[in-house]
Amino acid sequence: MQVNITARHMELDSDLKAYINVKLSRLTKYNDSIEDVRVIFQKEKFFYIAEIAFIGRGFRIAAVEKDQALKASFDLCLTNAQKQLKKIRAKTKSRRIRDIFDGINVFNRQRRRLPKPKGDIVRIESFALKPMSVEEAALELEAFDKQFVVFHNATDNSVNVLYKRKNGDYGLIQP
């Protein structure tokens, strides 16, 4: 966080500048994305005007206060800016929580909207997986005049599917 302190129509002592830096460094607990802070002091007749501007990622806060004492005007301005930082922190927290719950709700809605199959299951067949080669599965496919055969491949011990293609060739599905 970079702090720029400017005084118009007056001079600031080093104790006041140290006091300002200490107070501003404590504000990082409300928002750690503060990049730049500009503090401007002015003197107009009998009043001191303090202006603080916070610039950060995604926000800009400005506070202006006026008092007869220099430190008092700065402290009033600082409490005003602190309230604004707390408000921004609460908004971002609630937005993050809302975004998380929105993501969960979208996921649940998508899960509930899975398309249901149009047809009903009318027949269930069970097959014994016999260990055989691809050539034996092709012979069995031709012998029983089926569209596909599920078999246990004897060479690599995996379950494969052999099917007939429209052009008369065979297709093999392996894991």
Image: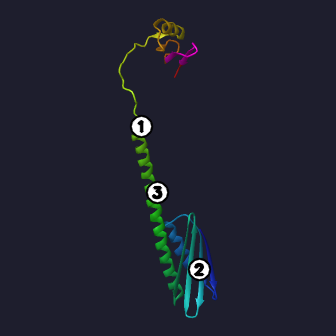
Residue to which mark 2 is pinned: 17
Residue to which mark 1 is pinned: 114
- Callout 2: SS: helix
- Callout 3: SS: helix
- Callout 1: SS: loop
Q: Is residue 158 visible?
A: no
The label shown at residue 26 is none
* Count of numbered tags: 3
Q: Nearer the viewer, residue 175 or 157?
A: 175
Q: Taking 98 as reference, is 69 above or below it?
A: below
Q: Taking 17 as reference, is 44 above or below it?
A: below
Distance in Å between CA atoms under marks 3 and 1: 28 Å
Q: How far from the left and from the top, in percent, is residue 22?
A: 54, 74
N-term-proximal mark, 2 vs 3: 2
Q: What secondary structure predominates along the stretch shown in magenta?
A: strand
Residue to which mark 3 is pinned: 96
Q: Residues within 10 Å of mark 3 (few under 14, many from 20)?
A: few
Question: Which residue corresponds to the image point at 49% horizontal and 70% vertical from the top-left?
Answer: 85
Question: Which residue corresponds to the image point at 58% horizontal and 69% vertical from the top-left?
Answer: 55
Is residue 156 magenta-colored?
no
Residue 167 occupies quadrant: top right
Q: Is residue 32 visible?
A: yes
Is residue 170 magenta-colored?
yes
Q: How far from the left and from the top, in percent, is residue 144?
A: 45, 7
Q: Nearer the viewer, residue 28 or 64?
A: 64
Question: Which residue corresponds to the image point at 57% horizontal and 66% vertical from the top-left?
Answer: 56
Type of the residue with mark 1: Leu
* Quadrant where the image shows the N terminus: bottom right
N-term-proximal mark, 1 vs 2: 2
Q: How far from the left and from the top, in percent, is residue 149?
A: 47, 14
Q: Residues within 10 Å of mark 2 (few under 14, many from 20)?
A: few
Closer mark to the observer between disc 2 and disc 3: 3
